Amino acid sequence: MTYDTLIIGAGLSGLAAGVRLAYYEKKVCILERHTTIGGLNSFYRLRGHNHDVGLHAVTNWRPPGSKTGPLSKLLRQLRLKWEDFDLAPQFGSAVAFPDVRLRFTNDFVVLEQDVADKFPSQADGFRRFAAHLDELDLFDADPNEISARQVAGEFISDPLLVEMLFCPVLFYGSPTPNDCDVRQFAILFKALYREGFGRPRAGVRPILKALTRQYKSLGGELRLRAGVKRLLQDGQRITGVELDSGETIEAKNVLSSAGSAETANMLDGPNVDWPGGRPEPGVLSFVESISMMDCEPKDLGLNDTIVFFNDSPTFRYEPPTEPVDVCSGIVCVPNNYHYDRPLDDARVRMTALANSAYWFGLPEEDYVCEKAAWFERMADAACRFLATDFRPHATDLDLFTPRTITRFTGHTNGCVYGAPRKWRDGRTPLDNLYICGTDQGYLGIVGAMLSGVSIANAHLLRD
Amino acid sequence: MTRDDIRQVILDILERIAPDEDLSNITDDVPFREQLELDSMDFLDIVMELRKRYRVQIPEDDYEHLATMQGTVNYLEPKLKDVVK
């Protein structure tokens, strides 16, 4: 039997693509190497608690019933309802630098006003910058990139404000150090600041479940523990895949969410001429900690949903030379969303840039101990920007590193936002091999799903 | 199918694609775009839904006929006349 499309990876992008293909009666199968779905936005259970990896917040929040914006577009395309994701809006978030703090919520006016208060001379420039970003064609597939910093500099003259605006944006999706393409920036700017943050009460699980339920009810097949070892190549075409088990499956098309470099490594046929050279994996990765708490964080004065902090006027977003970059980071309190009832447990999550090579090279006997030591340094740094040190109320800790990310997602270097070079139209040099997910280029939870949907629509539904 | 049947089919499809839209006041000779929040992805879906339900193939060059309800019904009438509702 030959499938219309095989999808590599049961993350958000692969599942969303699968829903579209199955809905239009394509014979489709998703192949996932891991024992569970989710990829970079997965979940796990440890010592009695359910945890998310990835997701701090679903960006692109809109009130239920909104007719415009990426979230509404996505729900329509997937034939899902607002209740399927059931996003609760955030309390409010902040960017904290040494002497200045900017607050943002799901109401853009709050940020505009805070910029006007803290940077009076920049208020007009900020508004014009935001308006300029609104007018850009975000889905322009032109591979030439334009520096977002350069564009920001044309509107905002105070470098501190630029740094503060870039900090959350880069942290939540830039695949490139210190700067990103202006389209990418505009997508993230809207997703974070204009639309804002929401979260399902049970984290990423209900989103993945809604996708999987929809996919399977439409006849889509999902195989776990089915890693693709090789793409079977016949000249410029893929004829199918070979799994880790040796089993082969034939397909008319393959859509890979495994990453462009990772996908290139699966090819075993004659040399493929990748425009711009063979794809390289990204290098930006993170460590993330989850501290279980014995009380609601807001009872300790931790009222923000997410705090992006940086301890100097300049924000460096690059792989650190130290194991973890403790100059900056993200603190996320999943309890701080307007749920219909409080969460059953409380936690504080921290994220910081990490040096992948260090964590990969660490001998096993040092790994646990180094994780614990770097957690303390991260928390020391973060707590300077919080109302209080949360650690005395922490009852349990888990910490994951780039090594963990690679182990569970297959992404080289523990890379979270994909390679710097994006394949925006989803095409590869091979006729029937397509890319979706982080290396296609739409990021975030909603972006990841739109990536799968767009590439499926563009290439895999029309025949 | 009669013209009325076809009109109802389009409304069903729009309801499915855009469940948050109010479809009760559609004016048949005004473009959908001016009455509903529909983008190119949604238009592709109308075409795909018609293909899925009635096996009607609509080439890309003909999409312009689908701008209004009236245009869509005119365009589909000969294609669906022998289809049983």
Image (tube, rainbow, N blue to C red):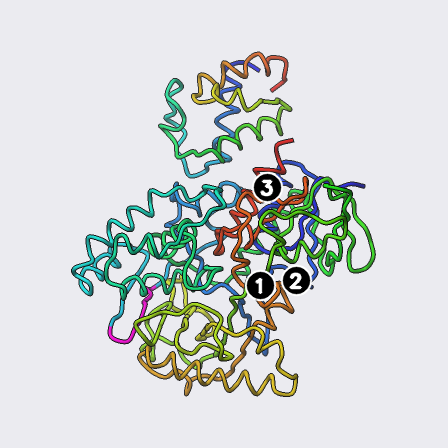
Distance from Cα at disc 2 to Cα at disc 1:
8 Å
Of A24 and A420, nearer the camera is A420
Left or right placement of residue A79 versus residue A254 in this view = left
Q: Residue at x 33, y 45 (%)?
A: A134
Q: Position of residue A59 (x, y in %)?
A: 42, 56
Q: Residue at x 37, y 67 (%)?
A: A305
Q: Are marks 2 and 1 in contact (CB under 8 Å)?
A: yes
Q: Which residues are magenta?
A: A91-99
| Label 3 environment density (alpha carbons within 10 Å; few <14, some 14–19, many ≥20) | many
SS of the residue at dot 3? helix
Q: Position of residue A125 (x, y in %)?
A: 22, 53
Query: Which amino acid type is shown beneath numbered disc 1?
Result: Ser
Q: Which residue is mark 3?
A: A456
Q: Position of residue A73 (x, y in %)?
A: 46, 42
The answer to which quarter of the image holds residue B84 is top right
Query: Which amino acid type is shown beneath numbered disc 3?
Result: Ala
**Is A341 covered by the magenta stretch?**
no
SS of the residue at dot 2? loop
The answer to which quarter of the image holds residue A167 is bottom left
Query: Which amino acid type is shown beneath numbered disc 2?
Result: Thr
The first of marks 2 and 3 along the sequence is 2
Distance from Cα at disc 2 to Cα at disc 3:
23 Å
Above or below, A335 against A259 in this view is below
**Is A95 covered by the magenta stretch?**
yes
Q: Chain of mark 2?
A: A
Q: Which residue is mark 2?
A: A36
